[in-house]
Amino acid sequence: MDEPARKREALARVEQALAASIRVKQELLESAAGDIAHAGRIVADALSGGAKVLLFGNGGSAADAQHIAAEWVGRYVSDRRALPAIALVSNPAELTAISNDFGFEHVFARGVEAHGAPGDVAIALSTSGTSPNVLAGVASAKDRGLATIGLTGKGGGALASLVDLSIRVPSDETPRIQESHIAICHAICEVVDDVLLGGGTRERSGR
């Protein structure tokens, strides 16, 4: 294949990926905007009342959990007080100790047991909705009186029926689901900041 052909192929692949991402997000807007707003209010009410948010997932979902916890402990767009959010994937010593001593399926359940309390919110991210450690984490959260929100893919898996509020991305493709999960979480951040900052004009950070 010559160089011009390689460039055309690369361009076509990029256009295909971006078009697919846009299409999935448009379908998400039409099917789940109300549920996302509801999730935002659940989180905002918890944080306003002094409770905290626990986030967890595997792989790319673990990175998303860390990302969103950082938006709340730091800032999303505007300066405001630090908000208590914990990504249960962030301590390698803790994860490896629990995995070694109890089994990997218990890593999030133990984290919820250690850090969760009634009134807190657990946000579980799983593209398949079937990850045993995520399901165990949600079960632990429900046992302890936490509100539970699940972000998953089109099928929902067992996660969709286990959580209090399920938000399903209308796709079976992992990259498209993950892209939409971070968009959902950012939308939740928008609602949280509006509630905590009174819905007024917000200065954008230089980040």
Image (cartoon, rainbow, N blue to C red):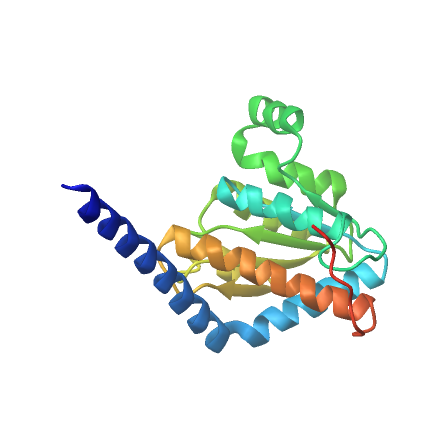
Residue at 50% across, 43% down: 60
Residue at 82% across, 57% down: 79
Q: Is residue 18 above or below residue 97?
A: below
Q: Is residue 4 left or right of residue 121?
A: left
Q: Is residue 62 above or below residue 176?
A: above
x, y (%) of residue 104? 53, 31
Q: In this view, does 68 lie above or below 63?
A: below
Residue at 78% across, 54% down: 118
Q: Is residue 123 left or right of residue 26?
A: right
x, y (%) of residue 38? 65, 72
Closest to the observer, 46 or 140: 46
Quarter location, residue 188? bottom right
x, y (%) of residue 97? 63, 23
Q: Can residue 181 be seen in this view?
A: yes
Q: Can residue 140 be seen in this view?
A: no
Closest to the observer, 27 or 49: 27
Residue at 74% across, 52% down: 72
**Count of labels shown?**
0
Q: In this view, does 183 lie above or below 144?
A: below
Q: Residue furthest left?
A: 1
Q: Is the N terminus in the top left, top right, bottom left or bottom right quadrant?
A: top left
Closest to the observer, 199 or 204: 204
Q: In this view, does 2 lie to the left or right of 19?
A: left
x, y (%) of residue 135? 53, 48
